[in-house]
Amino acid sequence: MDYISFQRNKIIFLCAVAFLIFISVAATFAYKDARFGVENLPSVLARLGEQAGYGLYYRIRFSLSPAVYATPDPERKARAVPALVYHAIDETGGEYTISKAEFADQMHALHSAGWRTVTLKEFEDFLRGQRELPERSFLLTFDDGAKESYYPVDPVLSALHMTAVTFILPKFSVDNGSHYYLSLGELRNMIESGRWEIGSHGQDSHQLFAADAKGTLVPALSRPVWLADKQRLETDEEYESRIEADLRISQHNLEQALSIPINAFAFPFGEFGQLNDSYPAAVTTVSRIAEGMYSMSFHQVRRGEAFSFNYPEPDPPRALLVKRIEPHPRTGPEELFERMENGLPKDLPFKDDFAKEHGWFSVWGPYDFTEGSLSLRASPEETGSALVLDGTRGWRDYRVRLLVEAPRRNGVYMWVRFQGNTQHAGCNFGNDYIHVEETLSDETSVIKGVRTENIAIPDGEFIVEARVNGRSLTCTLNDGVSVTSEFLNPALATGGIGIKIWDREPGHAQLIVKSVSVEPL
Amino acid sequence: MTHTRMRQRLEALAEALRTTVRDAGPVFFFFVVLYVIFVLKVITYKSVYDNLFFGIYSLLITIYILSRFLLSYLHKPIAVDLGYEPSITFVVPAKNEEDNIYRTIDRFAKIEYPLKKVEVISINDGSTDRTYDEMERAAKDISPFIQRVEVVDWKENRGKRHGMAEGVKRARNDIIIFIDSDSFIDPSAVRHLVKYFADPTVGAVSGHTDVDNASTNLLTEMQAIRYYIAFTIYKAAESAFGTVTCCPGCCSAYRRSYLMEFIDTWLNQTFLSVPCTFGDDRALTNFIIQKYRAVYSYEARATTVVPDSFRKYMIQQQRWKKSWMRETWIASGFMWRKNPLAALSFYAYVFLAFASPVVFFRAVIWLPVMESTWPVIYLSGLFLMLLLHGLYYRMKVGPRAWFLAIVNFWFNTVLLMWQLPWALVTIRDSRWGTR
């Protein structure tokens, strides 16, 4: 060891270098853990690189191809606002995923048509009637808080100046997250970016539970579940306290971890009992509990369930129930754009000769849309079918005329003031009768009617007309016999139009609609 | 007037700032690369559990390389003692070097050392050109100034080893300095070689050799880095324990009395019953370090001409690999008796040298084909290590085409890795032994 020197200054220098490098390396990993959670550093770097690369790519691509489908009018105010929901954006082709390219195309299409995102606060104020928003405003949301619902999305948001809400599962995301779920550090960073807001998606309820001893799986919130240790079903009280605890704990955990109020809740699986009739009390129970803690609760609107947009409520409840549109895999940008445009509140007068899609959606049974006509047909096991026109929820006083053909001479309903499947008025034209009907909370009653033998569904083309004005509803068949009621329930003050067919014999009913025209009164 | 002066002062300040930034940059990046290497190690340390062999390789190679940097940093400078001036003999064996030989020999009369203590023995090893005439001319020119000059003229070629042995036998002075016919020593080099011999345990001293023709092309620039690194880091690190494994023929000094103990054994050395005709310097050093110490003198400067074509370079490298193989085998037999750290480093290096082609094959061919995993970590790790060396060179030597050279170095490392297994196969074939 004679030819080695341990001079003090060399030793000090080496110690300093070793110390600095140790500190830097330790700090790197500490920062990585705090900011990105358990994911390993190369993946983190790959994500960041990808994010930066896509950010640049989108900026260039979007500026090169301003595909405008419609020209927005900044003066027009929104009458209803939709919310979109996505899960993960990845290339796995799963049931709840869409690809990066599809997502970017969709957002770009919406943006270039004048669609702009709003924040939770703006959205809520609008629904409570406390704020105006420009037409074509929408709320963009993501469920589950997967990393793949942030990293591929953020560059798109940044390039298009959009904001989004992400509904987080605190069980996975508080602390260090996982390889799949976002970490707390990532959430903080998202909030700091100003592009993201946070909502809760439940603590333990984002999973299926056994509903009976056989292990039939159901969404956690939808009904009392099977307690394997006690060999029995939950009591109503246990069910309620489980849901109450879940909603509260998830809110508490997020508020604690992020030091921000959490006011929005997205039902796990978009389900609060409304899709399952095995426990009818679920809807009211879950809604009541959510109302106690959150100012808005979000679920998904299945196509055909209801109008796709959210309308301001004249007498808003403490907690709003918000519908969201979920674009399914392989939804093209034009398709989503069309759906959004068709959901926009329609102006009167309105005329539809079926040259293009205007947003008719089925609430019952199949239909065919061909150029020039729309046909409804009862499927073999069903007695009828029904369609509603999207974007008409806000209509008030109007006259609808349908030019139709009923080859099998089955009954035809003309729905007006349609608010939902369980809340609407209508004209029921049958062979030998015309009824003025109203349906309130799923209870249908005939408020006026005529029954005479000279009433019949004609052969060939004929016209059905409904005229609704204030509390008065007049139903007229083929400009002949008409019936009027002046006592429509005040709850049905506004609402849209729909068509329903019915026949006693399954698979029999059929109707061809040639044109629809609606005049304001 | 003041205005001009102020502007000059400002310009000087700007220039100073520029230089500082220029010089601080490589230093900064050197430590950044070091940091990145450590981060990479932390990421991949778990792989040790996945596969013991490859995991250990990965850890060991990092520890080995970084420990070289550490030891070279702790390399001890020795002061020149003007009271210690042993007599010296330059031994220059040469074959067909008519272009360089005069310049090589002529330099001996210009060194900074008492010339009356300088002896020159040059051996013409059967040259077919005018090398002998050039030697005689140089001898005549320098003989008035130095103690003694002798030119040996062999009509038939006997080989470099015979030339070196002849020089040792004919020498009369204490210290023998071997100089290759294509190498040139700095006038100050001799004192820095000799000073180490004041310690009687020192038998050999390697000087520092730089590449003379570095700016010829990318290949020679790359070799310049390689030489610089091999000497200032790897030899300096070996020097810490007095176990420099090769004091190269281009500029090294030996104590004559120690050489005489085994000069004939060395001259008649055979390996696997084939006479050893290359790697003479490495073999000689190996004999020395069995009993004595071999050290490295950073201040003893010389330059040498390196191959400037890829073919010549490959042939030279193959020759070196073969002698490395042979002498490493021999050294393995006694290294364990040396300083434990020196022994550990030595055996670790042997393991790494043999394992590296296997590791390369696994990462770059086997895994991509069998498991479709890209060797990103492996190749970037390899590149980072070379980058570390390149930045070290850049910060010590100054701005040159170092980065491209590093890329070339990387390319050659990948290529030359396969020479070792090849050398193992052809170890008994001595055809490439000629220069």
Image: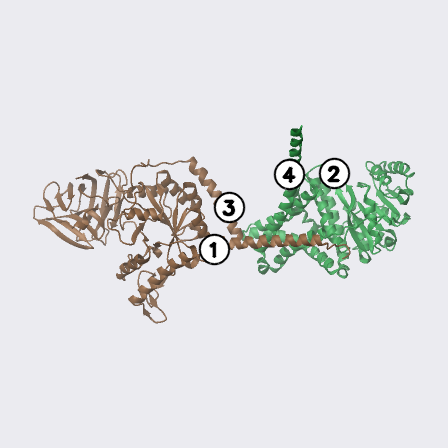
Chain colours: A brown, B green
Residue hosting label 4: B17
Q: Which mark is residue A277?
A: none
Residue hosting label 1: A179
Nearer to us of marks 3 and 2 is 3
Nearer to us of marks 1 and 4 is 4
Residue type at mark 3: give it. Gly
Could you tell me which residue is drawn at 45 percent across and 37 percent down? Answer: A60
Residue furthest to the top in view is B1
| Helix, strand or loop at mark 4 | helix
In the picture, the quarter occupied by the N terminus of chain A is bottom right
Residue hosting label 2: B213
Residue furthest to the bottom in view is A230
Mark 3 Cα shell of 10 Å, populated few (<14), some (14-19), many (≥20)? few
| Helix, strand or loop at mark 3 | helix
The chain ID associated with circle 1 is A
Residue type at mark 4: give it. Leu
Q: CA distance from mark 3 to mark 4?
A: 34 Å
Q: CA distance from mark 1 to mark 4?
A: 47 Å
The answer to whether residue A308 is seen in the rendering is: no
Residue hosting label 3: A49
